[in-house]
């Protein structure tokens, strides 16, 4: 009986089943994290909607918002893309989707620089020839207002210094468990005409600050919230992608284990049949000798 081959198959089956248990556990963990992230995203979407409603009032009282320094275009022809990814893998094509979007949208462009969250995207960006000018570590859960303010101020200063004429954020937008897509949203210069109807009816406010200062303050707060909201979308999409990837890995491991079990049983049955044949042949030889 070929015990060596059977033992190797048995050990491989054991290894595949162990992998199956691991991927199933990772899928369950990702599903739990995704549900929590989705609740946080829904709450943050409400806050963002209310902030945008406030923007109607801000621009209603603004005298000449188009002259604000954060709304006017500058002389730079370079563009900075703030790309959101992840520091961790095992989430399917999640970390490659953003870089693939840039490649399809812009190709290899010398006027595009990237500020990156998530080191897993670095390989794709280097492969496609994009320069990473800033790199931030991935956020374990969500981006805090303090972190958003630091990054937001850095982006605003780059725009004010005219190092970049346009700054946008690229992230995976979570729509449902079966649909996520990479989107790009321009944050500087601030495109208020596309976002707000300045003639819309709003609540009346007593405004003490200078209208231009009020517009600048609103834009800075909006950029901070936009970054936080983008991280919420990205995290929810990441956990969803990991859950799906681990589900598929679990199914593949089960199919592999089933195939190996069939091979194991076939080999074992063949060895038993051969052994029985040898016993019967030996018995017949003994009978002939006795005759």
Image: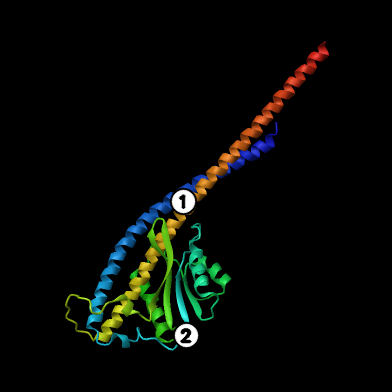
Query: Of marks 2 and 1, which one's residue comes earlier in the chain?
Result: 1
154, 164: nearer the viewer? 164
SS class of the residue under badge 2? Answer: loop
Quadrant housing residue 261: top right
Relative side of 89 to 271, left or right: left
Q: Quadrant of the N terminus?
A: top right
The percent position of residue 56, horizontal first and vertical second, equals 25, 76
Q: Residues within 10 Å of mark 1 (few under 14, many from 20)?
A: some
Q: Position of residue 150 (x, y in %)?
A: 38, 76
Task: Confirm or deny contact between disc 2 and disc 1 (CB under 8 A).
Answer: no
State the SS at label 1: helix
Label 2 environment density (alpha carbons within 10 Å; few <14, some 14–19, many ≥20): few
Q: Establish if 247 lies above or below 268.
A: below
In the rendering, which numbered label is found on residue 34? Answer: none
Q: Residue furthest top?
A: 291
Quickly name the residue at label 2.
77
Q: Is residue 15 left or right of residue 45?
A: right
Find residue 191 and report its horizontal and vertical position in percent.
35, 79
Task: Report which quarter residue 181 is drawn in.
Answer: bottom left
Res 135 seen here: no
Q: Residue at x 45, y 57 (%)?
A: 241
Say which of marks 2 and 1 sits in front: 2
Residue 273 location, x and y as percent? Answer: 68, 27
Q: Residue at x 37, y 64 (%)?
A: 232
Q: CA distance from mark 2 to mark 1?
A: 45 Å
137, above or below 159, in the image: above
Which residue shows up at 56% across the image and 39% down it? 258
In this rendered view, identify the residue nearer to me: 58 or 11.
58
Disc assigned to residue 26: 1
| 92 to 198, vertically: above or below | above
Q: Quadrant of the C terminus?
A: top right
């Amino acid at each position: 009986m070929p015990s060596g081959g059977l033992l190797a198959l048995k050990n491989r089956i054991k290894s595949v089943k162990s992998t199956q248990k691991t991927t199933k556990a990772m899928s369950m963990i990702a599903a739990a994290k995704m549900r929590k992230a989705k609740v946080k995203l829904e709450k943050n979407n409400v806050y963002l909607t209310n902030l945008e409603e406030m923007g109607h009032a801000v621009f209603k009282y603004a005298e000449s918002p188009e002259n604000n320094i954060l709304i006017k275009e500058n002389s730079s022809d370079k563009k900075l893309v703030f790309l959101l990814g992840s520091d961790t893998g095992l989430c399917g094509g999640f970390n490659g989707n953003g870089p693939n979007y840039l490649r399809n949208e812009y190709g290899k462009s010398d006027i595009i620089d990237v500020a990156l969250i998530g080191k897993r995207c670095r390989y794709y960006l280097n492969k496609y020839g994009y320069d990473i000018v800033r790199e931030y570590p991935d956020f374990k859960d969500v981006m805090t207002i303090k972190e958003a303010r630091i990054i937001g101020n850095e982006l605003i200063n780059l725009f004010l210094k005219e190092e970049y004429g346009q700054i946008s954020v690229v992230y995976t937008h979570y729509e449902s468990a079966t649909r996520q897509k990479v989107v790009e949203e321009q944050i500087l210069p601030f495109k208020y005409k596309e976002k707000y109807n300045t003639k819309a009816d709003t609540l009346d406010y007593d405004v003490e600050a200078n209208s231009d200062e009020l517009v600048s303050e609103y834009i800075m707060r909006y950029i901070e919230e936009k970054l936080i909201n983008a991280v919420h979308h990205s995290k929810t999409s990441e956990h969803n992608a990991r859950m799906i990837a681990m589900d598929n890995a679990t199914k593949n491991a089960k199919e592999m284990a089933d195939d190996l079990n069939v091979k194991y049983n076939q080999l074992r049955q063949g060895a038993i049949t051969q052994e029985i044949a040898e016993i019967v042949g030996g018995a017949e030889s003994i009978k002939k000798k006795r005759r």
